[in-house]
Image (tube, rainbow, N blue to C red):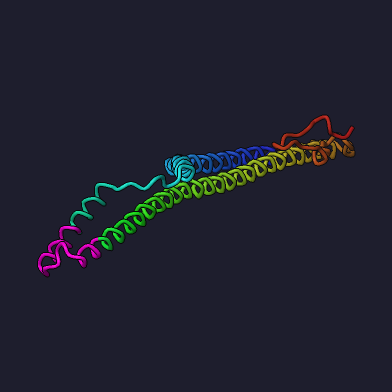
């Protein structure tokens, strides 16, 4: 009887601790998922904006207010130098002014494209952040699932061990009774001592399939 009680008590304690471990793993995964969700959502928005920006392209070049201000400041400085050197309005001045405007226009277009590609690159990095977050969540989820599955399998094994322990205890008790343990002689009753518990089949949760007992 002591073996039966010990088997039941021990199995229940193991099952309790296993459930606590399973809950801890699941709660940790849920907390991690909640913490990473903002990064995942930001990545989704970045991907959408990235796609739109790439499909749209840089568009037609137009002079920005900043470009116009810088050009005006450059012209003012250019004219001051020409006036100071006495070349203002001359052929050299016209040639220099043309070169200034051409160089400034090329620089403006170059800056325009640079800003576009920088914008696309930033959105691509934001999109990659979401992708990396999704990969991390997938890995965390897989690890959590594997851990929980392992715990469930161990719970099933613990229940199977409990039933085997009960079977051994009953077998021992019946053998004691038939073997003269209560003052009588006699032989043991084959097949009645439930040693057959050891040959029971169990389901995935460790519960005995009683219909599988030998007859």
* Residue 100 position in % (x across, y down): 26, 61
Quadrant in the picture for residue 103: bottom left
Q: Which residues are magenta?
A: 75-97
* Residue 84 position in % (x across, y down): 10, 67
* Residue 165 position in % (x across, y down): 72, 41
Residue projecting furthest to the top: 211
Residue projecting furthest to the bottom: 85
Q: Nearer the viewer, residue 83 or 190?
A: 83
Residue at point 80%, 41% (across, down): 198
Residue at point 41%, 53% (across, down): 117
Quarter of the image with the N terminus is top right
Quarter of the image with the C terminus is top right
Residue at point 34%, 55% (across, down): 111
Q: Nearer the viewer, residue 69 or 100?
A: 100
Quadrant in the picture for residue 171: top right
* Residue 20 position in % (x across, y down): 53, 40
Residue 7 on the magenta span: no
Q: Nearer the viewer, residue 182 or 196?
A: 196
- Dominant secondary structure, magenta: helix
Residue at point 42%, 41% (across, down): 38
Q: Nearer the viewer, residue 149 or 46?
A: 46
Please give left or right for residue 214 compared with residue 68 in the image. Answer: right
Above/below status of 106 relative to 214: below
Residue 76 on the magenta span: yes
Q: Is residue 18 visible?
A: yes
Q: How many marks?
A: 0
Q: Is residue 31 visible?
A: no
């Amino acid at each position: 009887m002591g073996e039966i009680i010990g088997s039941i008590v021990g199995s229940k304690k193991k099952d309790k601790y296993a459930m606590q471990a399973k809950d801890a793993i699941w709660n940790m995964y849920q907390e991690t998922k909640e913490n990473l969700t903002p990064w995942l959502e930001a990545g989704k928005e970045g991907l959408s904006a990235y796609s739109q920006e790439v499909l749209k392209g840089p568009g037609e070049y137009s002079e920005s207010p900043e470009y116009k201000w810088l050009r005006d400041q450059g012209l003012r400085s250019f004219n001051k130098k020409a006036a100071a050197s006495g070349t203002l309005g001359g052929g050299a001045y016209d040639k220099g002014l043309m070169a200034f405007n051409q160089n400034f226009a090329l620089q403006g277009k170059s800056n325009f494209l640079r800003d576009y590609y920088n914008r696309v690159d930033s959105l691509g990095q934001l999109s990659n952040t979401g992708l990396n977050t999704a990969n991390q969540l997938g890995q965390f989820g897989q690890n959590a699932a594997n851990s929980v599955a392992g715990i469930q399998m161990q719970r099933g094994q613990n229940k199977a061990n409990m039933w085997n322990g009960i079977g051994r205890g009953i077998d021992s008790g019946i053998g004691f009774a038939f073997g003269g343990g209560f003052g009588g002689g006699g032989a043991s009753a084959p097949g009645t001592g439930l040693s057959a518990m050891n040959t029971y089949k169990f389901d995935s949760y460790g519960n005995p399939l009683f219909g599988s007992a030998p007859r």
